Structure formats: C-alpha cells, structure tokens
Image: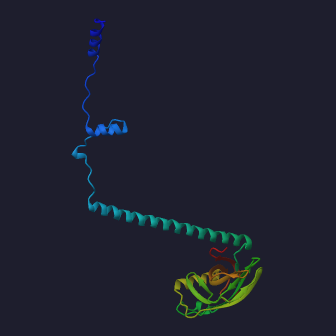
Amino acid sequence: MSDSTPTSNATRASTKLPPRPPKSSNASSSSSVTGTPVHTIQIPKDYVVNSPPEENLQKYKSYSRVQTRQRAFRHCHRCFCASLCLVLLTVVLIMAIFYFIYRPKAPTYTLTSLTISGFDPLSSSALTPLSPSINATLQTGNSNKRISILYQTGGSISAYYDTVNLCQGEWPVFRQPPRNVTVFETDLTGSGVLLTSVTRDAILKAEDDNKVPLKVNAKVPVKIKFGVITSWRIVVRVSCDVIVDSLNGTAVVLSRKCHANTHYLW
C-alpha cells in the first residue's frame, strides 16, 4: 500500500495542465450569459468612418430631385408616344375600312375639243399684242359606285404655249354623282399678250406644219362625299398636253394626254 501512493501522486504531477490566461470581466460575464466566447477587435483610427459633410447631403437631395423629374419626364414621354401610336393606328384602321367599303377610284379628265381665235395679228408683227380666245370642251368621269364629287368655286383653267400664258377661264361649279360622265364647255380669254420674235416664229412654223403644241392646266377645288360624310376641300391639279392643227377656228385635236394629281385619296 505504501508503495503505490507515491507513484499515483507522481503521475498526477506529470499530467497537470498549463495555466489558462486570465479573462476579462466583460468576457467572463458575456460568456457566462451566452455560453460562447467573445472576441474584441480593435479598429485603427485611420479606418473610422465619419458622417458626410452638409454640402454632400445637399448635393444628394438635389440629385434625387433631378432623378425624380427625369423619371416623370420619361413617363410622360412614354404615355405621349403610346397615345400617338394609338391615334395613328385608329386613323389607319378607319382609312382601311373606308377603302375596302367604298373602293375609291380617281376621276378622269379629257380635253375633247378646242375652238381658237384671236391669233390673226400673229402673222403681221411680233410687237402686236394678242387677245387669244379659246372655247374648251372637257369631259370628267366619275366611275365610283358610292362616291360623289363636288366641284367647288375658285377653279381655274389656263392655256399655254410653251411657258407663255395665252388665256385663262373658270372651272364651273357642279356636283358629279356616282357612275357619271359630265361634259361641259368653258371660255378662256386673254388680252395684251406679247410674244417675243423667237416665240412668234416658232408658233408660225408649228402652224405651217399643222402641229401646234399647247398645254391646258386646271386647278380644281373639290370635296368628296361618301354616304353622309363630306371631306374637306381638296385641290386637284389637271394637266393636258394637246397638239392641234391650227390656231384659227375649230381646231382638230391631233393628240391629247391628260394627267390629274389627285393626292392621296385615290
């Protein structure tokens, strides 16, 4: 018994653990409460973040107001573009429905005959003023089934040789119903028309050849009526190139070619 006791005491002395480092009072109290160790970290003074200065706060508020205005402007711009697209789409849809229901066709114009006078002084002298007079017979055709053409006041017709305005008159006012051909006469008169010697010689040579080129232009205001709806006032421009055999009496129209600029309705 006496031999075993000293051996056990020596064993306890050799297995004694090293001493633990002392704990702070806060760590001990925290660890006692939470049951977990607490670590304390020290931050250098250079890393301490201070609050921003007052001028930076004002800049931030100003920038926030600008951003708010920009967002409102972008929202208004998107709404405007969407509304505009909706209106355009509606107009295109209405025009497409109108086209497929009424099938609009452009009116036709033909210059059928001319009675010319007032060119007798042409053979005497180029300095003698002329007073040309032309009685023109025109034919207008409306081949539409449901559309009427209303010819308004203010229409005019003019006759030219090259660029010289010889005489002018008025386009009559009338209503042309659907599927109708209208023939009418109108008088074109001019006074004090002076020709250069070059133009005079060219007209005389063309008359000797029995091929005098003339141009007849018309500016015609019209309204289109389909059903109970009447369009706004539209200006139709008609241009006819004709060749006649003479400038005296009832001229024979050797060739004619008329073109009408009817814009976007046809």
Residue extending farthest to the front is 1
Q: Residue at x 28, y 9 (%)?
A: 7
Q: Is residue 107 left or right of residue 17?
A: right
Q: Is residue 145 left or right of residue 159?
A: right
Q: Quadrant of residue 192?
A: bottom right
Q: Is residue 175 left or right of residue 239?
A: right
Residue extending farthest to the left is 45
Q: Nearer the viewer, residue 49 or 214?
A: 49
Q: Position of residue 228 (x, y in %)?
A: 72, 82
Q: Is residue 210 visible?
A: no
Q: Nearer the viewer, residue 188 or 265?
A: 265
Q: Is residue 53 visible?
A: yes
Q: How many marks?
A: 0
Q: Quadrant of residue 245?
A: bottom right
Q: Residue at x 30, y 7 (%)?
A: 4
Quarter of the image containing the N terminus? Answer: top left
Quarter of the image containing the C terminus? Answer: bottom right
Q: Is the residue 49 above or below the residue 180 in the image?
A: above
Q: Residue at x 51, y 65 (%)?
A: 78
Q: Is the residue 120 above or below the residue 94 in the image?
A: below
Q: Position of residue 74 (x, y in %)?
A: 47, 65
Q: Position of residue 232 (x, y in %)?
A: 63, 82
- Colour scheme in use: rainbow
Q: Position of residue 100 (x, y in %)?
A: 72, 69
Q: Nearer the viewer, residue 215 or 124?
A: 215
Q: Nearer the viewer, residue 254 or 97?
A: 97
